[in-house]
Amino acid sequence: MNTFSKVFSTFLLLFFSYQINAQSCNYFHKRNCTSTSEIEMKEDMQSKSALLSIGQKSDFNLIAYEGQDYRVVLCADETFNEPLEFRIYEKVRQRIDPSAKTVEEPKEVKSVASEIEDDGWGSANSYDSYSDDNWDSESNTSAENSGKSALKYKLIKELLYDNTEDQMAQELEFTAENTKSLIIEVKIPGEEVVQKLKIKEVGCVGVLVEHKKSRGLGF
């Protein structure tokens, strides 16, 4: 077997191994994410599982509906021997003042124009009005009809929760006091691998989302 054939065979082996492992992660959250709470909640269809690597950071969208309590539970397979980091952000439209040279943002607010992408979790099951292709600017219909300049907005993400400031908790309960478009950001501990990934450097990660009628827990 020549060198090219050996390299190609190795590539195929790694590719199919990765695909098989990724498929085995599809319902990882159902089998492995368990809450320590005694409060019963129903699994939300927005729950996700994915195959991630050491050092990788990945986001997925979550719609939290008004009047519902939510519980977010993280779990990972034995590949990752440290607690997962996770943060919850709210996507907020911020009006751009055309007369201002710059738009100041709160300290813990970041622009997400280039950050929202599919990192392996798959598409959200719920409609997200913030996720259309024109989310970084928006026209005001009444302004257009009156001949005035259209109002413009940009989408930012505002930090609501960070488990690195909460003893690395792997689950969180909260109440949606109004409907919110959220981002759950999960980071795998360790240094991100630059070279080709080895099978032992990737593993399944699950984010179980549960909900029930509100009993008033904040957010």
Image (cartoon, rainbow, N blue to C red):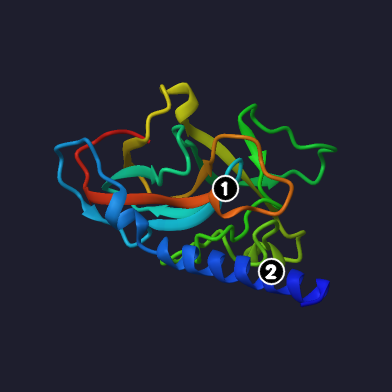
- According to the picture, the residue beneath numbered tag 2 turns out to be 11
Q: Is residue 149 above or below residue 90?
A: below
Q: Quadrant of the C terminus?
A: top left
Amino acid beneath label 1: Glu
Percent position of residue 70, x then y: 30, 45
For mark 2, does the 10 Å Cα neighbourhood hold few (<14), some (14 to 19), or many (20 or more) residues? few
Element type at mark 2 = helix
Residue 92 shows in the view? no
Which labelled disc corresponds to residue 132? none
Amino acid beneath label 2: Phe
Element type at mark 1 = helix
Residue 64 shows in the view? yes
Is 168 situated left or right of 171 in this image?
right
Furthest residue toward front: 1
Q: Is residue 46 above or below residue 10?
A: above
Q: Is residue 94 above or below residue 105?
A: below
- According to the picture, the residue beneath numbered tag 1 turns out to be 201
Q: Quadrant of the N terminus?
A: bottom right
Residue drawn at 49 percent across, 26 percent down: 164
CB of mark 2 within 8 Å of CB of mark 1? Answer: no
Total count of labels:
2
Percent position of residue 136, x then y: 69, 56
Q: CA distance from mark 2 to mark 1?
A: 16 Å
Is 2 situated left or right of 185 in this image?
right
In the rendered image, which quarter is residue 3 located in? Answer: bottom right
Sequence order check: which comes first, mark 2 or mark 1? Answer: 2
Percent position of residue 51, x then y: 50, 56
Q: Is residue 207 above or below residue 88?
A: below
Residue drawn at 45 percent across, 35 percent down: 81
